[in-house]
Image (tube, rainbow, N blue to C red):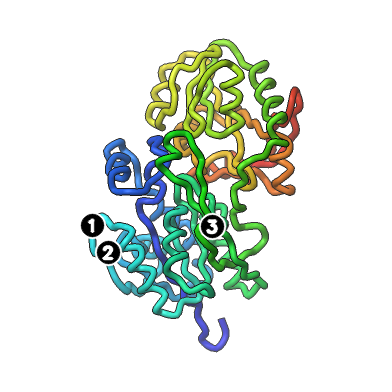
Amino acid sequence: MPNGLRLRIGVLVNPYAGIGGSVGLKGSDGQVIRDKALAMGAELKAISRMQRTLSKLIPFSDQVDFFCFSHEMGEESVRAAGFVPQVVGSAQTIPSTSNDTIHAIEKLISYQLDLLLFAGGDGTARLLVDSVPKNQLVLGVPAGVKIHSGVYAYSPEAAGDILLQILGKKLVSSVTRDVKDINEDAFRLGQVKVKYYGELTVPEANDLLQQVKNSGSEKNAQAQLDVAQTLIEQLDQDTLYLVGTGSTTHLFLQELGLEGSLLGVDLLLNSQLIAKDVSANELMQAINSHQSAVKIIVTAIGGQGHIFGRGNQQFTPDVIRCVGKSNLILAVARDKLLSLNGRPLLVDTHDPELDYLLSGLYPVVVGYQDTVLYQVGY
């Protein structure tokens, strides 16, 4: 930047964001859930996801000053990306809590930041709504299990691309986006209750922000039934199906006379449900013990377009690699696909190499015996 001007970026990481995803806990809120997730073998992902965003800024390293809290709340991500940050505080408790996040937000914005970059989920965004001035520019790096808020880029790399456009002096819009969160206790009981909490100001560039999730409509119900019937007619004997989350896949199981888990991953074999709401480890065990073909059936989140990485982190990179790209079945009602307005379906698996390999043109079941070709990106 000319005349010695430098971009002042605060970096905030909620290290436990998304920790319940791969083990099927459908969230990360509260110490009890975090402890349970860790005991089940869950790994912290938010730190590396922030690093992926920051690594894109290496070409502009002489034009950025980073401010963060110590250790896993920001410092580790910044240093791993190759930068030397100004550490302005530390968590008061180990492991850190939401109170530490609030303290970090308040401390960071006192440094007159140009932008506060944060990694987390909807719960983290809620804390920002309550703690930052309305005109403070923020940007989310998605790391949660379920993300309904529109303040996140659709991937860590997309967040980096937005920052690159700012650093490259491109015209980047400043917009307000909704912050929404889901009741996790109701979510674990199969109920989706989303509440609006406020707005945050974010930079928007080239559709790199995640769209706010759509909850579907009655108009889409018949289309979902048509998709479900097509999936039923295409089932193969002795093939193990890993059935992902969502209303379309849930309806598919209901049409088979089965009561699957709306918000979990289920196992289907010869039109019978053999396991419900399984974890990533249980998926791997089922794949390894099955002697015949294995396929994954997934749908997309309405409005956002994610087929992997939002609400179905049980499909870990290891699981997806074992099943293979050629054994993915995409089922998205036509209206839901049209609502993307030409944007690609998205994958965000925590593995950039796998995301690249999964990209490309796929057949997508959109109605009764109706399949279209559609692009998957990352």
Residue located at (74% from left, 49% from top):
341
Is 108 in front, or is 2?
108
Is 79 in front, or is 275?
275
Marks 1/3: CA–CA distance: 27 Å
Q: Which mark is residue 91?
A: 2
Name the residue tied to disc 1.
94
Q: Earlier in the sequence, mark 2 or mark 3?
A: 2
Number of marks in picture: 3
Residue 3 horizontal/vertical position (percent): 55, 88
Disc 2 on helix, strand or loop? Answer: loop
Disc 1 on helix, strand or loop? Answer: loop
Is 258 in front, or is 328?
258
Q: Are discs 1 and 2 less than 8 Å apart at CB?
A: yes
Is 59 in front, or is 184?
184
Label 1, residues with CA under 10 Å away: few <14, some 14-19, many ≥20? few
Residue 304 horizontal/vertical position (percent): 61, 47
Amino acid beneath label 2:
Ala
Amino acid beneath label 3:
Tyr
Name the residue tied to disc 3.
152
Amino acid beneath label 1:
Ile
Residue 48 shown left or right of residue 238 in the figure: left
Residue located at (43% from left, 66% from top):
130
Residue located at (64% from left, 18% from top):
232
Disc 3 on helix, strand or loop? Answer: loop
Residue closest to the far left: 93
Q: Are discs 1 and 3 less than 8 Å apart at CB?
A: no
Q: For the N terminus, give its image quadrant.
A: bottom right
Residue 270 horizontal/vertical position (percent): 54, 12
Q: Which mark is residue 145?
A: none
Residue 182 horizontal/vertical position (percent): 48, 47
371 in relation to 131, above or below: above
